[in-house]
Amino acid sequence: MQVEISEPARAKIQQFRDEEGANDKALRLSVVRTHCMGGRGHGYDLHVAQDAREGDATVEAGGLTLVVDRESARKLESVQIDYVDSFQESGFRVTNSHAKGKCPCGHHDLFD
């Protein structure tokens, strides 16, 4: 599994970690189902990991430690995480080469 984190994303994550006092904690990256297309769409969740769980994979990216559960890891073969801040949108953007496409709204990934 390969995860790339852009400098804007790394800076935003570090800002959050500083504000939360969570500099010594890893981050958990997960693939989550959405309601889009009858539950076939998938989004991404990134938050401070409270603990590592049995079966978690650990990945170093952009100077950050990420933990990923076994099921999510199957869908995260090659992922890029960026942070955008524009008039039209603001937030983290995940580009996943393993996704087979996007839902009609364009916000959620589709997998097999």
Image: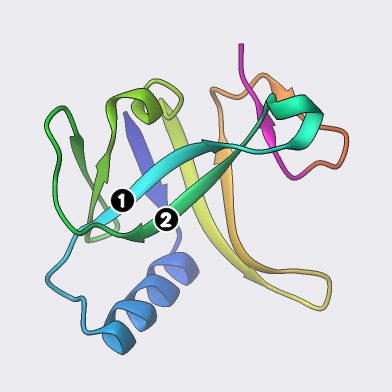
In the image, residue 94 above or below residue 102: below
Residue at (38%, 67%) from the top-left corner?
10
State which region is magenta.
107-112
Name the residue carrying label 2.
46
Do the residues under discs 2 and 1 have CB atoms within 8 angstroms?
Answer: yes
Q: In this view, does 71 lie to the left or right of 103?
A: left
| Circle 2: element type | strand
Residue at (72%, 37%) from the top-left corner?
35
- Residue type, mark 2 in image: Leu
Find residue 54 and report its image quarter: top left
Residue at (36%, 24%) from the top-left corner?
71
> Magenta segment, principal secondary structure?
loop
Name the residue carrying label 1.
28
Q: Residue furthest top?
A: 112
Quadrant of the snapshot with the C terminus: top right
Number of the label disc, if any, that sits on residue 77 = none
Find residue 1 and report its image quarter: top left
Q: How far is mark 2 from mark 1, CA to CA?
A: 6 Å
- Residue type, mark 1 in image: Arg
Q: Is residue 45 left or right of residue 51?
A: right
Find residue 87 and report its image quarter: bottom right
Sequence order check: which comes first, mark 2 or mark 1? 1
